[in-house]
Image (spheres, rainbow, N blue to C red):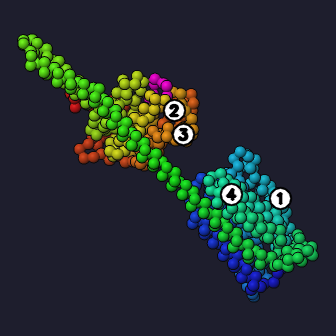
Amino acid sequence: MQPPSPVTAVVFFVQGLAFFMLGISILVATRPKTSLALGRWLGLLAAFGFLHSLSAWVEFVRQLPPASEPVSGGFELVRNALLVLYSIALAEFGANVLRSLLPKRPALAYLPLALAVWWLPPALVVGYLCSQGAIGLAVVEAIARYLIYLPAALLSALALFWQGRVLVAARLPSLEADCRNAALAFAAYAVSGGVIVPTGILLSSPEVPGQNYGGFLQLPIEILRLVLAPAVAILIVRVLRVFEFERYLEIENLNGRLRELSHALVAAQENERRRIARELHDEASQLLSTLLLRLRLIENVQTPAELHQRCGEVIQLAAEAAESIRRMAHQLRPIALDDLGLVAAVQWYVAEYSAREGIQVSFKTQGFVPRFAPEVELAVYRAIQECLTNVAKHARTREASVCVEGNNGILTVTVEDQGCGFDVSAVQNGGTKTLGLLGMRERIELVGGTIEIKSATGRGTVVRFTVPTRSAPAAGENREGVKNGQDQSATVRRPSRLASRGG
């Protein structure tokens, strides 16, 4: 056993401090949600840092004189146990990162099992020999460093190196050098901690006497580890900058989506104004012009019978003009949405849509659907409109269904068709052609909901969005809601009677 030394104690204290700060830095920098394979498994690397620091500090205490033989042996036993634990954490980190980075290589899924098969038999033999007193704890440490720590550290170095290669393809080339340097530092520390063991038992030639790297260098191994430990910690902390870049790219993507939505909003406003202007000119304006002409013709009426006929024509034209204006008003903002709620408005829209597009849409409700906050009802209504508009434009089908379900204050809407379908991933990455889907998603997410789109070419499309919110009826609104499809159907017949009066 190496005699206690205050200088060696300082070396181990600094090593422990470096790896403890590494663990703290990882915990502070790690993001709960990240698309990086490295980020999902950094907790194991943090565990390695904390366990390694604890192991170094145990050795630091053991090196402080005076230390009795039993106390020193106990410290050495604890240090060996910590060595095995932080080596396993390091191996799990490297194996899981590589498995995530290379999903097309399924053999990597068996890497942790292969490591266990590699470690377990020697560990049982060494443990048995140690319990029988055939070998000492120093030999156990040497074997553990060769068989467990060395492959685990090299595996983690390979994982860091491969993560750097992936970052180049992810538009983060500046971080590739950080990952490469961290991998090299990790590999050097693996060699210093796994190949050159303090006992010199497995490498005991005169060229490598255990504590030195050979006669050509004559550098104590603890000094080299003292240099490498902070270097490893600093370089891995530099790798953690990847989360800042990832956040920056997310902000850029969100800004891009915001710009697209702004352009889409302006375009939608102009298209809506163009449609309203065209309908006003083609319907309301024409009807009012005809009505004005008929009113002027009344001035030349000679007989009561002719007057009665002219008045009937004027009344008919006035009714048609009122109906046209009422229809445009409903398209802009359905009165039933404010007066009777989401279910009535959707049922009215489905009926009007089926008559206009020639697509048979079945509408049903399930559970208890109360009145929600106005912004929630409006967002869901517009999302249903967008879904059915897409069915008419792209699905090439004559049948669709809409289901509105309420369950404990959670609103779930499912719009389904058996049309031609589409490739969801390809369409969502298709730029401006997906602004309708993007706007629908934004509407639902703004009210705290989620949206799910399932589709495949030739297999139809299912759009389901869920809005978890408590019902929030305004003053004077119906607070009772409806419990089943029969009650809701009776409720939504009321706006039809109002509409027949021009309301």
* Badge 2 vs badge 4, beta-carbon distance below 8 Å: no
Mark 1 packing: few (<14 Cα in 10 Å), some, or many (20+)?
few
Quick one: label 4 or label 3, which is nearer the N terminus?
4
Mark 2 or mark 3: which is in front?
3
Q: CA distance from mark 2 to mark 3?
A: 18 Å
Q: For mark 3, does the 10 Å Cα neighbourhood hold few (<14), some (14 to 19), or many (20 or more) residues?
A: few
Q: Which region is colored magenta? A: 395-401
Q: CA distance from mark 1 to mark 4?
A: 34 Å
At which x and y percent is residue 102? 70, 49
Spatial CA distance of label 4 from label 3 is 28 Å
Chain-order first, disc 2 or disc 3: 3
Picture quadrant where residue 29 is located: bottom right
- Reading the image, the residue beneath label 1 is 121
Q: Looking at the picture, which amino acid does disc 3 mark?
A: Gly
Q: Is residue 87 above or below residue 74?
A: above
Query: Which residue is at the front of the view, 161 or 478?
Result: 161
Q: Which residue is mark 4?
A: 164
Please report whichever mark, 1 or 4, sits nearer to the chain's N-terminal start.
1
Residue position marked by numbered label 3 in the rendering: 430
